[in-house]
Image (cartoon, rainbow, N blue to C red):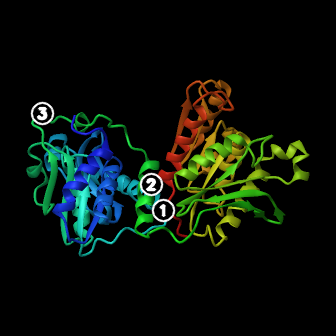
């Protein structure tokens, strides 16, 4: 073991680089996700701005853990010809994998940066930082991205790498800085005491902290206030929360007997807010309408309110241009899927928690928004209803069961799992809208 964790590794690397780069105009680019905590410490040591250098591995179609190359922003692609020859992957398969990974790349950019523009690297020294180098394909792609953006000099800096890492990197970097190159290198993690996986929340938090230090915070402050959505001629009640630099807004459709005050939905909403997503929790019915229990199960009516509220949301100056997603619980899930088929709604993604998507039966084949169905493993009836509904969906979809969870997800840790699933689904499928 060389390093206690990524923070210590970043501090040591920053100390080395502080002397190495003295007097240069530097920007630090961290590779998500593990490289960002290291890069954050380097940026602080150099008093330099921090940004991400987004790269996606191109996995072999039938063996995705085997990388046949990598891609990055600005159309950069690095291909491992040896892997292509060995696996027999042809140009058409390579193009399909690249198209998918570029979509994910764009979503990640929106997730991590929010409303902030990428840090300018033109004419500057770009220090590309990761928590280590293994094969080198991702690091090479990152260096080429920085080069394509006009960097005058590229420095690849890592805490640990194999002995032959200079050969693996070729001429893609102008300078290589590594704290140690052990002879017994097998994997990066063997040289860290704590090599816990870094999540998106930590990446986003590190970038925001660095942006605040260098005056790059978004001009729009966070908001959290009561609102009155208007759906058609009906005025409703809700609460709109917009973190600074929000990349999208998730509209919640609650189930029967619930409201915008639902503690479970509010719990999920807070998790989405931490990930940089805005949320709108609102009542789909007026107080008078709620007194008639038939309205609670009137899916077309609830869907009409959801679609109308979506239109209201898109016309607000503070949310105009943001992608919209739907999170539905119980009967609210049916309303979300029904509304998703309306041409005016166009949600970027839908998540159902313990939902009744079967109640949107006639509309299911027409849903085009990527849909995630989350069901408790101890809720067999609803699980079967979700499986039947999933079979009718023609859009991108997935069914996730949460082990041990009953219908209300009251068991310890189950609602946290729902929140994680929803966060990942929305951030992977939502980016600023262009309408």
**Residue 58 to residue 233: above or below:** above
Mark 2 packing: few (<14 Cα in 10 Å), some, or many (20+)? many
The local secondary structure at tag 2 comes to helix
Callout 1 environment at 10 Å: few (<14), some (14 to 19), or many (20+)? many
Near-viewer residue (96 or 252)? 252
50 vs 395, nearest the viewer = 50
Q: Is residue 83 left or right of residue 302?
A: left
Label 3 – label 2 distance at C-alpha:
34 Å
- State the image coordinates of residue 311 (x, y, percent, origin top left): 69, 65
Place of residue 431 in the rendered image (x, y in percent of width and height, measured from the top left)? 50, 60
- Quadrant of the image containing the N terminus: top left
| Nearer to me, 166 or 323 | 166
**Residue 184 — which label?**
3
Q: Is residue 204 left or right of residue 284?
A: left
- Badge 1 vs badge 2, beta-carbon distance below 8 Å: yes
Residue 271 seen in the current view: yes
Between residue 149 and residue 97, name the one nearer to us: 149
């Amino acid at each position: 073991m060389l390093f206690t964790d990524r923070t210590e590794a970043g501090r040591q690397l920053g100390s080395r680089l502080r002397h190495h780069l003295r007097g240069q105009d530097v920007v630090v680019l961290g590779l998500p996700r593990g490289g960002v905590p290291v890069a954050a410490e380097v940026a602080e040591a150099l008093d330099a701005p921090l940004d991400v250098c987004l790269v996606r591995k191109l996995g072999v179609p039938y063996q995705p853990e085997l990388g046949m190359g990598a891609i990055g922003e600005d159309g950069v692609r690095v291909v491992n010809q040896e892997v292509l020859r060995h696996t027999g992957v042809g140009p058409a398969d390579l193009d399909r994998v690249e198209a998918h990974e570029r979509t994910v790349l764009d979503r990640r950019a929106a997730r991590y940066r929010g409303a902030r523009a990428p840090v300018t690297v033109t004419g500057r020294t770009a220090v590309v930082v990761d928590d280590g180098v293994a094969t080198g394909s991702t690091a090479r792609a990152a260096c080429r991205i920085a080069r394509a953006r006009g960097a005058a000099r590229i420095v690849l800096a890592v805490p640990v790498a194999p002995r032959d890492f200079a050969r693996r990197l070729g001429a893609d970097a102008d300078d290589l800085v590594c704290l140690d190159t052990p002879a017994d290198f097998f994997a990066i993690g063997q040289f860290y005491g704590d090599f816990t996986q870094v999540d998106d929340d930590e990446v986003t938090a590190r970038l925001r902290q660095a942006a605040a230090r260098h005056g790059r915070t978004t001009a729009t402050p966070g908001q959290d206030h009561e609102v009155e959505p208007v759906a058609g001629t009906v005025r409703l009640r809700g609460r709109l929360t917009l973190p600074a630099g929000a990349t999208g807004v998730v509209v919640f459709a609650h189930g029967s007997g619930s409201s915008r005050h639902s503690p479970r939905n509010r719990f999920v909403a807070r998790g989405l807010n931490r990930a940089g997503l805005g949320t709108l929790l609102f009542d789909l019915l007026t107080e008078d309408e709620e007194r008639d229990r038939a309205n609670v199960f009137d899916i077309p009516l609830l869907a009409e309110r959801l679609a109308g509220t979506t239109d209201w949301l898109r016309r607000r100056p503070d949310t105009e241009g943001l992608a919209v997603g739907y999170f539905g619980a119980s009967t609210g899930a049916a309303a979300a899927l029904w509304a998703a088929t309306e041409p005016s709604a166009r949600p970027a993604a839908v998540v159902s928690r313990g939902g009744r998507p079967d109640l949107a039966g006639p509309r299911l084949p027409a849903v085009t928004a990527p849909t995630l169905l989350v069901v408790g493993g101890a809720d067999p009836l609803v699980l079967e209803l979700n499986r039947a509904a999933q079979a009718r969906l023609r859009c991108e979809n997935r069914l996730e069961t949460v082990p041990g969870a009953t219908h209300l997800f009251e068991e310890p840790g189950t609602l946290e799992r729902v929140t994680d699933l929803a966060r990942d689904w929305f951030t992977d499928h939502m980016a600023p809208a262009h309408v």
